[in-house]
Amino acid sequence: MSLVAGIDSSTQSCKVVIRDAGTGALVREGRAAHPDGTEVHPDAWWSALQQALESAGGLGDVDAISVGAQQHGMVCLDESGNVVRPALLWNDTRSAGAAQDLIAELGGPEKWAEAVGSVPVASFTVTKLRWLARHEPDNAARVAAVCLPHDWLTWKLSGATGLDALATDRGDASGTGYWSPFTNAYRPDLLELALGHVPHVPKVLQPTESAGGRLAPGTGDNMAASLGVGAGPGDIVVSIGTSGVAFAVADRPSGDATGLVAGFADATGRFLPLVCTLNAARVLDAAARIVGVSVGELSDLALQAPPGADGLVLVPYLEGERTPNLPDATGSVHGLRLVNATPGHFARAAVEGMLCGLADALDALRLTPERVLLIGGGARSEAVRRIAPSVFGCQVLVPPPGEYVADGAARQAAWLLAQSPEPPAWSLGEVAAYEGDPTPGLRDRYHEAAGQAAG
């Protein structure tokens, strides 16, 4: 039996799964926490990875490894391969002004959509490089190479020290803002526009190329989740993690000048049009803290309240928002009356508000899906699963709970071993179907309240 390891280095933690390469059966797993914050030194990821690997029983009997990690994070290295400054993560919004400057300097959002399939927002690496150039010019001048969290961890696992050994894949590269899914190539001119010079960037590997020995190329977390859940053309996946994501698997690249849809590539040679919200599962965490209950108890409370929460609406812009692009927005509660001033109504409004934001993400994709798959930590909430069909207006399929980013990375590692045209077929397990009638007026009330928050 050949074993493969899949790593998910996410915003909040590092997870490792060891699986049978042929069947995908879970053999063992481990995890370790990451520090809080939107600015983290990469050494913290490396330390957490070592802890997670140890708790998973190590890599001694593992034949191939792959890393999936949070997208967009800016890891800058000097000529010696040392980290120049702590990495700015995807959810760090300080580069919102830099994004607007870059959009204008290239000639508008249409030019960006044509160049790289996406219009920059504060999440994208290219905007963080511009922020660095403007606010820390001495550090910017020291940048000899720029890479992403998964690139850096793969490089560390390889044991290489030279910058030339840095490698990535087309999926994660497509979230930088300086790699084009249309041409499968970097845009050095956009790197120079952002940073003032052109640093070294990782080589973009094909899905079954090695990043060194038994290391697969790795990929971004959304691309790994797509692999892990076995998504194909016609599927839309809604992932409720630290961020909320709706993405589809497509055969052609896309470019949306509105900026709502990011025209990413995936980890298989296809494409992954994606809409992201900053606020997802942590909305439930925050609501539970406010009410003074656990997240599980919040779910129970939400299901006891009526659909629509008797008009109570929570706009969940707790950390600004990316879709719509409102980096300085805050959360708000609307329609509070005596009749809905209960913990249950607030719990229901929190779940419905989070799901309304994700429903807007689904709408932005402008696709008629064959399947809508709901995954991520937030999908473990029974309230989320039962309320989602009423908000989305369609049947929702929920696979068994799993670490789908780590699973997708493991499946990529198995693909490296197999060297087959497509990744090995692994069973997803029993999928539960949820249905529900749309809640009248819910999304209209949400849009009215969200408009006030934006205004």
Image (spheres, helix red, strand yellow):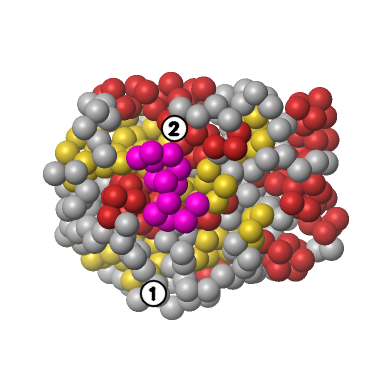
Q: Amino acid at mark 1?
A: Gly
Percent x, y of residue 83: 62, 25
Name the disc covering residue 234, or none.
1
For label 1, the crowd category at 10 Å Cα-Cα, with few meaning under 14, some 14 to 19 and many 20 or more, is some
Residue shown at 33% from the left, 27% from the top: 52
Residue 152 seen by the camera: yes
Kind of element beneath mark 1: loop
First to last magenta residue range? 205-218
Q: Nearer the viewer, residue 221 or 246?
A: 221
Please check the rendered image and state whether residue 216 is part of the magenta-colored stretch, yes or no. Answer: yes
Left or right of residue 239, residue 170 in this image: right
Percent x, y of residue 69: 46, 41
Q: Nearer the viewer, residue 331 or 8?
A: 8
Q: Nearer the viewer, residue 438 or 151?
A: 151
Left or right of residue 205, residue 132 in this image: right
* Mark before the other along the chain sequence, 1 or 2: 2
Residue shown at 32% from the left, 57% from the top: 419
The residue wearing badge 2 is 158
Principal secondary structure, stretch drawn in magenta: loop
Q: Classify the position of the C terminus by image quarter.
A: bottom right
Percent x, y of residue 267: 44, 57
